[in-house]
């Protein structure tokens, strides 16, 4: 078992760093599952995402430094927001929702960029307030935090029915993979982000394939509500 852990983390089994790597790897594997389920318009995807936040950022903060809660709590709120947002739409099969697709506008892009900046700042936390993030040699750390923020904000876009958000999640994950490949990455870290990219791409295809069914179900519910209202009058 120790050899497996060392292979996955490039760290000594039982060390703090090895534990953090494993927790984060588990987190992103769960988020990859969440992205795929959300592509199928399945509410369980939000639970998979939130379990991922709990297993990774939240658990790491509780074990090794409460300053991590600065980014973990907002990330958890993203999942809660997604559940709440999707609860407004009619059900579609088991745990499914007839979530309509929304078009991407200039306002959407501007909001996305602003949120990425905010979540990047939250990810940096003390590194930003202490000035370390602005010092020479910290560029790769900042870039990694930007890519992590893109993944998180991508889930906000999914909550709002933006299909392109799945591709944003995939781009963020691929960006991390490209970065870590040049730095002898831990297999667990590399594999987890590969899963995120695959899960997001699979989610995008599933979302596009399910658009006709979701739109039909949404229209049927709207017509039923209108008929009920007219009958009541």
Image (cartoon, grey):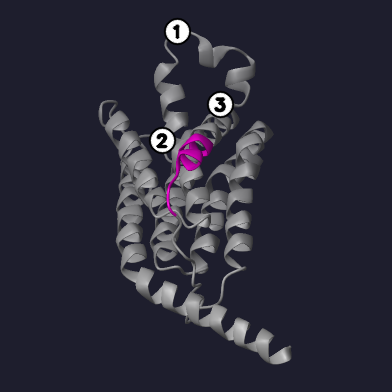
Residue at (37% x, 68% y) in the render = 211
The residues tagged by marks 2 and 1 sit, at their Cα atoms, a distance apart of 29 Å
Q: Nearest to the eye among marks 2 and 1: give it.
A: 1
> Which residue is tagged 1?
136
- Residue drawn at x 47%, y 54% as measured from the top left: 158
Residue 221 shown left or right of residue 193 in the figure: right
Residue 102 visible in image: yes
Under tag 2, what secondary structure? Answer: loop
Residue under numbered circle 3:
124
In the image: residue 198, left or right of residue 157: left
Q: Residue furthest top?
A: 136
Question: For this view, does 62 lie left or right of residue 181?
Answer: right
Badge 2 local density, few (<14 within 10 Å), some, or many (20+)? some
Instruction: Reply above or below: 171 against 165.
Output: above
Please, what is the dominant secondary structure of the magenta stretch? Answer: helix
Q: Are marks 3 and 1 in contact (CB under 8 Å)?
A: no
**Residue 78, image x, y percentages:** 59, 50
* Residue named by callout 2: 12
- For mark 3, give the secondary structure: helix
- The residue depicted at 41 percent of the width and 25 percent of the height is 143
| Disc 3 versus disc 2: nearer the observer | 3
Q: Is residue 6 visible?
A: no
Labels 3 and 2: the sequence-earlier one? 2
Percent position (x, y) of residue 161?
Answer: 48, 58
Viewer-closest of 224 and 213 = 224
Q: Is residue 44 left or right of residue 4?
A: right
Query: Nearer the N terminus, badge 3 or badge 1?
Result: 3
- Residue 13, given in percent of the width and then of the height, sits at 43, 40
Q: Where are the magenta residues, as a range?
A: 103-112
Question: Which x, y percent locates residue 102?
Answer: 46, 56
């Amino acid at each position: 078992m120790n050899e497996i852990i060392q292979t996955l983390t490039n760290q000594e089994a039982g060390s703090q760093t090895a534990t953090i790597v494993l927790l984060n790897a588990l987190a992103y594997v769960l988020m990859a599952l969440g992205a795929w389920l959300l592509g199928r318009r399945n509410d369980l995807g939000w639970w998979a995402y939130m379990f991922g936040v709990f297993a990774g950022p939240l658990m790491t903060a509780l074990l090794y430094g409460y300053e991590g809660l600065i980014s973990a709590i907002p990330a958890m709120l993203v999942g809660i927001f997604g559940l709440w947002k999707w609860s407004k739409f009619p059900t579609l099969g088991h745990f499914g929702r007839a979530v309509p697709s929304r078009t991407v506008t200039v306002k959407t892009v501007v909001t996305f960029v602003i949120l990425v900046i905010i979540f990047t700042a939250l990810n940096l936390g003390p590194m930003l307030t202490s000035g370390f993030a602005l010092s020479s040699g910290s560029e790769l750390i900042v870039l990694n935090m930007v890519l992590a923020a893109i993944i998180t904000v991508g889930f906000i876009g999914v909550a709002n029915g933006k299909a392109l958000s799945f591709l944003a999640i995939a781009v963020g994950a691929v960006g991390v993979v490209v970065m870590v490949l040049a730095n002898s990455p831990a297999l667990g870290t590399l594999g987890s982000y590969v899963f995120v990219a695959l899960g997001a791409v699979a989610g995008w295809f599933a979302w596009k394939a399910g658009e006709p069914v979701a739109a039909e179900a949404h229209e049927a519910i709207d017509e039923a509500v209108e008929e009920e209202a007219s009958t009541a009058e």
